[in-house]
Amino acid sequence: MFKLLKNLKKRDVLLFLVVVAGICFQVWLDLKLPDYMSEITRLVQTEGNEFSAIIYNGAMMMACAFGSLAGAFLVGYLTANISASFSKNVRKTLFSKVENLGMAEIKKFSVASLITRTTNDITQVQMFLAMGMQMLIKAPITAVWAVTKILNKSWEWSTATAVTVVILLSIVVAIMVIVIPRFKIIQKLTDRLNDVTRENLTGIRVVRAFNAERYEEKKFKKANDDLTDTQIFVQRMLSILSPTIFFFMHSITVVIYVIGTYLISDADQMGKLTIFSNMVVFSSYAMQVIMSFLMLAFTFMMVPRAQVSAVRINEVLDTDLSIKEGKQDIKQTAETGTVEFKNVSFKYPDAEEYILENISFKAEKGQTIAFIGSTGSGKSTLINLIPRFYDATEGEVLVDDVNVKDYTFESLYNKLGYIPQKAVMFSGTVSSNVGFGDNGKGKISPEKIVNAIKVAQGEAFVKKLDKTYFAHIAQGGTNVSGGQKQRLAIARAIARDPEIYIFDDSFSALDYKTDATLRKALKAHTKNATSLIVAQRIGTIMNADQILVLDQGKCVGQGTHFELLKTCPVYRQIAESQLAPEELQKGGK
Amino acid sequence: MPGPIRGEVEKAKNFKVAITRMIKELKPFYIPSFFATLFASIGSIIAIITPNKLSELTDEITNGLTGQMNFDAVWSIVIVVAILFVTSLVFEIIEAFLMTDVSNNFARLLRTQISEKINRLPLKFFDNHQTGDTLSRVTNDVDSVAQSLNESLSTLVSAITLLVGVIIMMFVTNGVMAITSIISGLIGFFFVFIVLKRSQKYFTMRQRELGNLNSHIEEIYSGLNVVRAYNGKKESDQEFDKLNKKVYDANRKSQFLSGLMPPMMGFIGNLGYVAVCVVGAIMVMNHAITFGSIIAFIIYVRMFTSPLSQIAQALNYLQLSAAASERVFEFLDTKEMPDQKDATMHLDKDKVKGKIEFKNVKFGYKKDQLIIKDFSASIKPGQKIAIVGPTGAGKTTMVNLLMKFYDIKSGSISIDDVPINKLTRENVHELFTMVLQDTWLFSGTIKENIVYNRTHISDARVKEVCDTIGLTHFIKTLPHGFNSEISENESVSAGQRQLLTIARGMVEDAPFLILDEATSNVDTRTEELVQKAMDKLMQGRTSFIIAHRLSTIKNADLILVMKDGNIVESGKHKELIEKNGFYAELYNSQFQNA
């Protein structure tokens, strides 16, 4: 937690000191109040006093109360500002950090977890700062100050108060010790209930087809009962708290009064009145002491939760970036549109097994290179080395004869048009999605966007959309179909006009016909561009200039379609599983 | 302890209807609710009596200041007070327990009703409603209903009792002092009310801005590879900064205002205290009241302000509860599948021969739009039928009709000459084994996923099936074999998931088989393996295969080619290729030169 607090800006630290001062001021006034109270009590009790004295003390008391309120305003305003500015800064730092993480690190954390860390966890810490910080400072100051005020009044009263504090704290702590671990259990049980319901919903056809409705309901009943029973238990425990606290707070007043009667009856005539007004004051101080101890206890309950969040945030901030940006902003290169792998191997930092081993090839300008292999053969990883989502463990990846590690990210990405397996759509419009990003050649023009969509075979469906090129796209592209998303994603790459296209299994959501027409149009549009294609379908790749067949990270065949049919058994197997022998002769190079 | 006012208070569309409905649904809980409110009122009444007793105590002590302390009188008052305190403690705890039980059991009941409802809704419902929406009704909305019910019901009763009681007691004790307390309380409450209103506005704003920022973060994180490769960082950073700034503003404002509540409540308390003391002092001096009455009023004035804010908060909660319950009841009131009165016949799955006949079938998901426009076909036992066509052509619709997931508009579908509308849905489902494109596995062990809801399947049978489709090796590599848990991001690949769903279908024999794009998740080499498994599955059964990859269906007995909801061609592979129509076009596009 403290480590994270280092993210506070200097200005915030200064403000923080003002907060502490403000709280001290507030506590001072709060504790001054009972003095005036006792004065008023004394004045009311004794005969023949000036009425103006009561008014004076009443006014002083109001002044204290008002001053304390003003202090609370100031402190509240500053803490709200500090905590909001803290969360703003940490969120920004974290966001920038995540943007620069390599894919390996992102996989390690998982995207979902990174999202909660940037959103919920930061909110958690901020809440703690906003509410807890004030209490953590105020409670001990009040407690100590109030204790010193009453300590020399009467040991009997002090003992009674101390005993009450101890009893109350033990009750609170005991309940919390029982309840807090169960909060986590409740979270798990809620997740379970969610899972069961989600499963029933997503598998609704399967459930119906297997006549498994009762089975699902039974599963749900168990999850529901587990959750509800635990919740009842926890809430019952918690519901004991507030009546118990009030019970003791009321009782302490009575106890102090009862002790008071004995003290008064033992005292001499002069002392009686002093003890009486002390008694009234003491009971209000005792209340303050008890309240501040309770406040402290509850604040400490908040610490673990905020601490967990702080640790999770720090985990991300402390992660070393495995991908470091190159220094050279390379504009002029000896070659253009070439990609070369020189004995490239790749494995995850902690892993033993290589995912890619000793891959070498060179794509010349305008060529199409294809990669094929079964799931897990490493073809996606291979292609991801070019945009530096991962870095090669051994060997070199060269773009235009320059190692990708030497480019600044911007200059490298200006050369590439990468289309991922799962089309990514951002909330916005068709145009904002296709014209996304920056290619170093200025803003992408509307004509380019229209043309790119046309090449990507998206014109027909985009024109049918409401507001056509400015049609709304929902977050994650949920309002367009998978095939449409894929075509827009391809259009996005085309619109940047890159030297090198990277298709990471980007055609799989398209039916055969669209796939074929799209590639034809693309070929015509990008005569000079180099294409690297990962695919499952033989039909998609059989015309490539060079095909690399991957099997468990190794290149087991390299050549054209016909060469591979003859020489590479793995390729032949894949091909024959898709097409009949005579069909295999129809296309290809 | 007044909690911070969280989130935005959503308004119910029709508060009165929602509350009436909720009261009706609460019927099983009338008795405990009645006792809870009764105890709450008793607690309030005790709380009102206590200050009176305390003022008696103070008066006794004041008397002792000048003369002899009457210890008997002191102790008799203290004993009464102690009894009152303990009784009130006990009643309050019992009340809280009762309310906890009522609200949670009510939540349990609602959840159960939703879960059962899910299985009674027509599939059509799920076409138009997102999973997340239904899910949030099961968890968030039901939770809101329960929580706010717990917070509002008894609080409302006890606060109102307290308020009325305090006012009565104050006037009984002293009219002038009563008016003083009420006025000072109301002045304070007026300010609290203003702050409350303003902070609500900023909380709503904060919630909205935070939502916007969160979805931006979500979007950028999930598409990070694209953001990076397209140099979109600058764009996304600008947007982030803009949203982050907005959240910051809303944050500090809402935080500030909500933080003001406790000190303001404290100030109101002090204001009341001073007012009571000053006015009281004058009256004591004039011998209009005793000092004990001042002590009583000091407590009354606090008692007066707290139920006011409690009532305000309880009404807020009730509002929340109404809004959430509206959504829950809306779901529970959705139209269910028609009952099955007409289903008078039954087909025994061991005796079914496997003949299926479609006669002039017409169907559409929407009233005015036909998807299947007059389809007839006769399928002999043991035949293999393939359905092909581009996406959106209505292939899956055929399956939906066969499985009786949807009812046809006109025409008839019959199994062994029995029309399926004469059969119950359960009976129809029994006759089919179905493997779908989305490989639906649930969290549980491998074995549970394969056996699923069928209790009579032996372990030996499960093993046998897994052997046949080549799953055994994979299962053996898992730490606990058949008893290994499957969870979301486990190392079970798409292909293996597919095989598991196939195994689920295979463990029990059914006369018909439906494979809906069952191999589209698998790479082609794994597909071959799956294909072999499927061929075994299809032996001797009438099967329907929907496939993307045309290679899988070449040897079908009958290929139905669909386009825009119509069967445009039908026949065997060879015939269709020779015909050189839509099928041939579809088929040949695989080898087109790019």
Image (cartoon, rainbow, N blue to C red):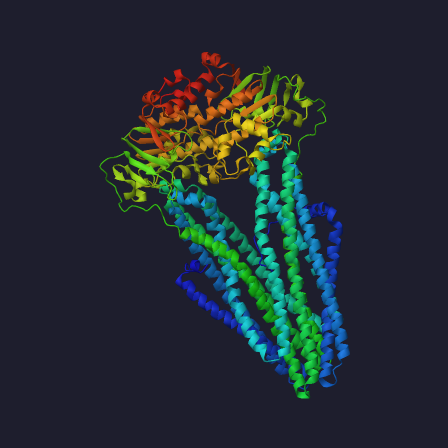
**Residue A173 lies in quadrant:** bottom right
Is residue A263 visible in the rendered image? The answer is yes
Rendered-image quadrant of the N terminus of chain B: bottom right
View extreme (left): residue: A334
- Given residues A177 and B180, the one toward you in this image is A177
View extreme (bottom): residue: A269
Is residue B161 visible in the rendered image? The answer is no
- Given residues A469 and B516, the one toward you in this image is B516
Whole-percent x, y for residue A242 in the image: 65, 62
**Residue A404 lies in quadrant:** top left
Horizontally, residue A585 falls left or right of residue B543, namely: left
Horizontally, residue A136 falls left or right of residue B95, namely: left
Q: Examine the rendered structure and indicate whether residue B238 appears above or below residue B559.
A: below
Q: Residue at x 45, y 26 (%)?
A: A511
Rendered-image quadrant of the C terminus of chain B: top left
Whole-percent x, y for residue B182 in the image: 68, 68
- Given residues A29 and A161, the one toward you in this image is A161
Q: Examine the rendered structure and indicate whether residue A494 appears above or below residue B214.
A: above
Q: Examine the rendered structure and indicate whether residue A587 appears above or below residue A122.
A: above
Horizontally, residue A408 falls left or right of residue A576, namely: left
Q: Examine the rendered structure and indicate whether residue B557 appears above or below residue B447.
A: above
Whole-percent x, y for residue B256 in the image: 52, 61
Whole-percent x, y for residue B82 in the image: 73, 69
- Given residues B405 and A243, the one toward you in this image is A243
Number of dots carrying numbers: 0
